[in-house]
């Protein structure tokens, strides 16, 4: 029997945060090297959250006990309304993320208007920290705050904050005045890029890390309009949940170079392939310009 992973056992809120920054004041060489300049302009902050208590794995004695309800790669969550997704966009930087503005060929910026899991919520840069903090407070069932940092606040419901390449996002959030572990003391930070599957794939390639798009491909996830904060937050939450419920056979297939798991479309439905075909690494086309080894 496979024990349920710790993250799914605790009565906590899992919240994925993905920040997007514009290419301003960054050279192509810096982009390739993964260097993030502090003066870059944050365009949007994506948030995707799920209450662990509402997942079929909560309270289960083993993953096998919950398998029927979980579905292949946790697609039961894809098909439910249990995931809450938001894209908080900064009004002053709207023109920087415009698809009509000239961008360098290496720039991966995606307009907040490309958010496909809802409608972007625009706010001023000065209000962004309140917007982010209060959105999280709302998710854990607490009242909003209008002065930061708040005093004598302890979130009773534990939060797992999840990032992909956390250093970038934490720096960008700090520039907005957001320190998650100060505002939410009962919390823990998890880096999806450092979880077992992504780490093993990177090690096998001789790279320090892999990009998010490579992980999505290996897990057989269809994605659209990546590099929008809200969209990426949802994809990263899906990837996190999928990795935690992979069977040993699925995990091995996802790890092997030149292979992926069978493709799941955006709604979590298996995409059928002709009997004579298998889904290899080169067969899965995902809209992304992500480069392995360059943190997002």
Image (cartoon, rainbow, N blue to C red):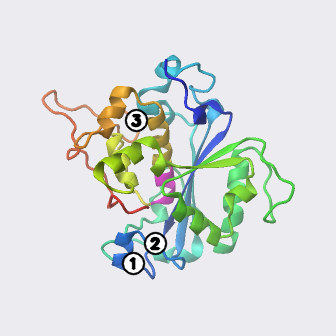
Residue 293 lies in magenta, yes or no?
Answer: no
Q: Which residue is mark 2?
A: 97
Q: x, y (%) of residue 255?
A: 32, 39
- Packing grade of label 2 (10 A; few <14, some 14-19, many >=20) is many
Instruction: Provide the residue designation for mark 3.
Output: 268
Residue found 67% across the figure and 45% down from its top: 159
- Label 1 secondary element: loop
Residue stretch rendered in magenta on the structure: 228-233
Residue 262 is marked as none
Question: Horizontal placement of 109 versus 185: left or right?
Answer: left
The structure residue drawn at horizontal position 40% and vertical position 42%, both measured from the top left corner, is 197
Q: In x, y percent, where is residue 254?
A: 32, 38
Would you identify the image quadrant in which residue 178 lies?
A: bottom right
Residue at the disc numbered 1: 101
Q: Are the residues tagged 2 and 1 within 8 Å (C-beta)? A: yes
Instruction: Name the chief secondary structure element in magenta.
Output: helix
Residue 101 locus on image (x, y percent): 39, 78
Q: Specify few, some or many for label 1: CA neighbours under 10 Å numbering under 14, 14-19, or 20 or more.
A: few
Residue, x 49% and y 22% (percent of image)? 2
Mark earlier in primary sequence (3, 1): 1
């Amino acid at each position: 029997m496979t024990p349920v992973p710790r993250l799914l056992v605790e009565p906590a809120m899992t919240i994925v945060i993905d920040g997007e920054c514009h290419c301003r004041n960054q050279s192509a060489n810096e982009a390739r090297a993964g260097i993030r300049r502090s003066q870059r302009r944050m365009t949007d902050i994506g948030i995707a959250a799920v209450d662990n208590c509402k997942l079929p794995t909560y309270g289960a004695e083993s993953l096998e006990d919950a398998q029927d309800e979980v579905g292949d790669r946790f697609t039961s969550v894809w098909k439910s309304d249990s995931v809450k997704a938001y894209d908080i966009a900064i009004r002053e930087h709207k023109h920087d993320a415009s698809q009509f503005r000239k961008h360098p060929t290496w720039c991966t910026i995606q307009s907040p208007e490309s958010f496909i899991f809802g409608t972007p919520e625009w706010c001023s840069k000065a209000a962004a920290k309140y917007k982010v903090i209060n959105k999280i407070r709302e998710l854990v069932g607490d009242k909003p705050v209008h002065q930061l940092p708040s005093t004598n606040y302890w979130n009773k419901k534990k939060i797992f904050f999840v990032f992909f390449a956390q250093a970038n996002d934490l720096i960008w959030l700090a520039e907005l005045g957001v320190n998650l572990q100060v505002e939410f003391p009962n919390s823990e930070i998890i880096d999806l890029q450092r979880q077992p599957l992504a780490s093993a794939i990177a090690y096998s390639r001789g790279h320090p890390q892999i990009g998010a798009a490579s992980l999505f491909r290996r897990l057989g996830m269809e994605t659209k309009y990546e590099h929008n904060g809200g969209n990426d937050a949802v994809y990263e939450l899906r990837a996190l949940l999928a990795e935690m419920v992979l069977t040993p056979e699925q995990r091995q297939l996802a790890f092997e170079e030149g292979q992926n798991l069978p493709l799941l479309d955006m709604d979590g439905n298996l995409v059928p392939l002709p009997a004579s075909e298998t889904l290899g690494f080169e067969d899965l086309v995902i809209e992304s310009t992500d480069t392995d080894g360059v943190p997002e």
